[in-house]
Structures are given as C-alpha cells and as structure tokens.
Image (spheres, helix red, strand yellow):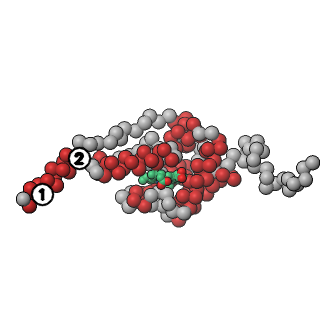
Amino acid sequence: MKNKIWLAIPVALLAIQFIQPDIRNPPVVAAMDIQQVANPPADVKAVLKAACYDCHSNETRYPWYSRVAPVSWWVANHVDEGREALNFSTFGALSPGDRSEILEEAGEKVTEGEMPLASYTWMHPEARLSAAQRNLLSGWLNANGGEGAGAPENDGQGAGEAESGDADDDD
Ligand code: HEC
C-alpha cells in the first residue's frame, strides 16, 4: 500500500505535464511599444526590459523551469494578469489619459517596492533593482505619468486647477 502511494507521486507529476498553458508570445509591433511611443532614455529602457518585460510585454522569456507543471501554470497566470494590468508592447494603443495614469501607477509600484514581484526577483537576480535603478525608473515614470504627463502637449483640460488662483470668482 505504502509503495503504491510513493509511486503515485511521480506518476501524477508526469501526468500533469500534459496540461500545458499556451505560452506563445503575441506578435510585437515595434511602433506600439512604449520604447518607441514614449522613447525613454537607454538606461530606463534597460531597467524596464530586465525587470518588467517578462510579465508586462509580449516579449516574455520563459526559463526552462517555467515550462514544468505546476510552475508553468503559476507563471502563465502571472503573465496573463500582468499583461492585462499593463502591457508595454501595446502601450501605443492607450489613450493619452490612460498612458499617464498607468505610468503614474507604475511609478508608485516601483517606489513602494511592489514591482517587480518578489516571487520573480527571487529567481531573476538581474531584475533586483538597486536603489539607484529604482530611483531612475520611478523618476522617469513619474515624470511621464500623472501630474508630470505630457506637459508640452497639455491642452489645459483638467490641469489648470492648481494654477488658476481665481477659480472661485470667475464671473
Ligand atoms: C512576475 C511578473 C511581474 C513582473 C516582473 C512585474 N509585474 Fe507588475 N504586475 C504583475 C501582476 C501579476 C500584476 C497584476 C496583479 C497585481 O496588481 O498585483 C501586476 C500589476 C502591475 C501594475 C498595475 C497595478 C494596477 O493596479 O493596475 C503596474 C503599474 C505594474 N505591475 C508595474 C510593473 C513594473 C513597472 C514592473 C517592473 C519594474 C513590473 N510591474 C514587474 C506581475 C509582474
């Protein structure tokens, strides 16, 4: 009886290998990628690619262990959810408002140390951000998102509250 249980474990591990998630990367259109759309400086690009692109782009690199179930299910799930929340490969498809909002959000996540996910940096030392890299990335994200967003192309819509000192006597 005991022997049968010990045999059941490798058999089950083998059997679940047949349940493989679809990990083919969607096509990449360079013109839609944040690298072209927002043209970050080279050092910012490098950090984005090393620390975010595996989950937030269509250029995911899958290490061998991420193809072995049940790890493969867990990784595929992170990539799905990560792309859904923010996909740098399709950044150009977002409205200017959405771009600015998600970059601001990303700046916060990086500053707070919530992104990249700890479970990821554990296996990906190249994605562990030094304080300098964190500052560099969050600095760029904040400068291009939220309040800092699109200052040159700002049409004044919604951004004027702070400057117009006489908002309450406009008659
Ligand atoms: C291991 C995969 C993984 C990596 C690497 C990763 N993320 Fe995420 N990220 C996720 C997942 C999964 C979610 C969605 C669930 C959540 O919010 O925790 C997410 C959500 C987000 C969100 C959206 C939050 C929201 O509320 O909509 C932002 C912004 C973000 N990540 C930025 C980044 C940035 C910037 C990096 C690189 C510095 C990064 N992430 C690296 C997996 C990852």
Query: Please, what secondary structure does the residue beneath circle 2 have?
Result: helix
154 vs 4: above or below: above
Q: Please provide percent x and percent y for residue 21.
A: 32, 42
Q: Which residue position is annotated with label 2? A: 16
Q: Amino acid at mark 1?
A: Ile
How many numbered marks appear? 2
Residue at x 23%, y 42% (from the top left corner)? 18
Query: Is 47 or 68 nearer to us in this picture?
Result: 68
Report whether the residue tagged 2 is closer than 8 Å to ligand 1: no
Front of the two marks 2 and 1? 1
Q: Residue furthest bottom?
A: 131
User: Which image quarter is the N terminus in?
Assistant: bottom left
Q: Nearer the viewer, residue 56 or 13?
A: 13
119 w.r.t. 13: above or below = below
Q: Foreground residue, 131 or 75?
A: 75
Residue at 87 percent of width and 54 percent of height: 168
Q: Position of residue 137 (x, y in %)?
A: 56, 56
Seen in the image, is 92 located left or right of residue 26? right
Q: What secondary structure is marked by label 1? A: helix
Residue 171 located left or right of residue 32: right
In the picture, the disc for residue 166 is: none
Comes first in the chain, label 2 or label 1: 1
- The residue lying at 52 percent from left, 39 percent from top is 90
Kind of residue sitting beneath label 2: Ile
The residue lying toward the viewer, choosing from 98 and 51, is 98
Residue sitting at 44 percent across and 58 percent down? 117
User: Pointer 2: residues within 10 angstroms few (<14), some, or many (20+)?
Assistant: few
Question: At which x and y percent is residue 53?
Answer: 46, 48
Q: Does residue 136 appear anywhere in the picture?
A: no
Estimate the x, y position of residue 156 in percent, counting from the top left: 78, 45
Residue 5 is tagged as: 1
Question: How dense is the environment of label 1, judged by Cα within 10 Å: few (below 14), some, or many (20 and up)?
Answer: few
